[in-house]
Amino acid sequence: MKRGILVFSCSCVALTFACTPDEPGTEDEIGDTAGESSTTDDTTGTDTTTTDTTDTTETDTGAPDLATVSGVIVDMQGAPLPSPGVQLCGPIDDMGIVEACIPVPVAAGSFTVGAKKLGLWSLKVVHGPVDGRNFAGHAFRITLNDGDALDFSSPPITV
């Protein structure tokens, strides 16, 4: 109970700082002049500000995938499993701490996931009971390097 209250109170403090509006005259307002130029008209003494319109518009889809992992998950008879639970967790640091786990969507036993960071990762595959059969799980430690495209479809991952 105390842990829950501590987490809640820390979250409230973090949200308070994240949602605080900028005060007039702060560094953000003063220093945010990218793409603008200011000139003084010598004849009238007035300042004019123009905006640079040469900026290119580009959609921000996040960082590109540096490596990909794909594969197929099958049962002991070789049939693709309809909805196994797959996660790509990492990168894993020297102390064994995992930065994040990415849930991987699986369609008819097939999956593909991209990694935004390189290093040691863990690919986890689990599956619950289906048709009265209980499945186990697997976890693979894999090292992802720039440009890797690991394929676990032949042979497939058997659960």
Image (spheres, rainbow, N blue to C red):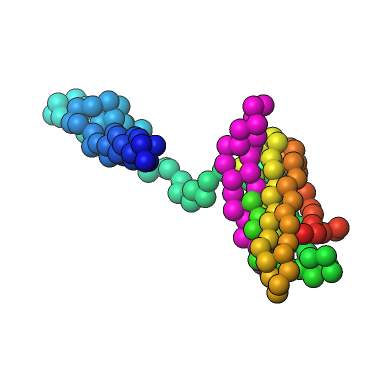
User: Does residue 64 show up?
Assistant: no
Instruction: Look at 36% across and 36% down and name the residue there.
Output: 2
Vertical arrangement, residue 81 with respect to residue 119, above or below: below
Vertical arrangement, residue 142 with respect to residue 80, above or below: above
Outermost residue to the bottom: 131
Instruction: Look at 23% across and 37% down and name the residue there.
Output: 21
Instruction: Look at 57% across and 41% down and name the residue there.
Output: 100
Q: With 37 as the anchor, is 42 left or right in this view? A: left
Q: With 80 as the anchor, is 23 left or right in this view? A: left
Queried whether the magenta region covers residue 118, the answer comes back as no
- Pick whichever, 91 or 47, lies toward us: 91
| x then y, percent, for residue 81 | 72, 67
User: Does residue 60 show up?
Assistant: yes
| x then y, percent, for residue 85 | 64, 58
| x then y, percent, for residue 156 | 82, 59
The magenta segment is 88-107
Classify the position of the C terminus by image quarter. Answer: bottom right
Q: Quadrant of residue 73?
A: bottom right
- Pick whichever, 71 or 138, lies toward us: 138
| x then y, percent, for residue 52 | 36, 39
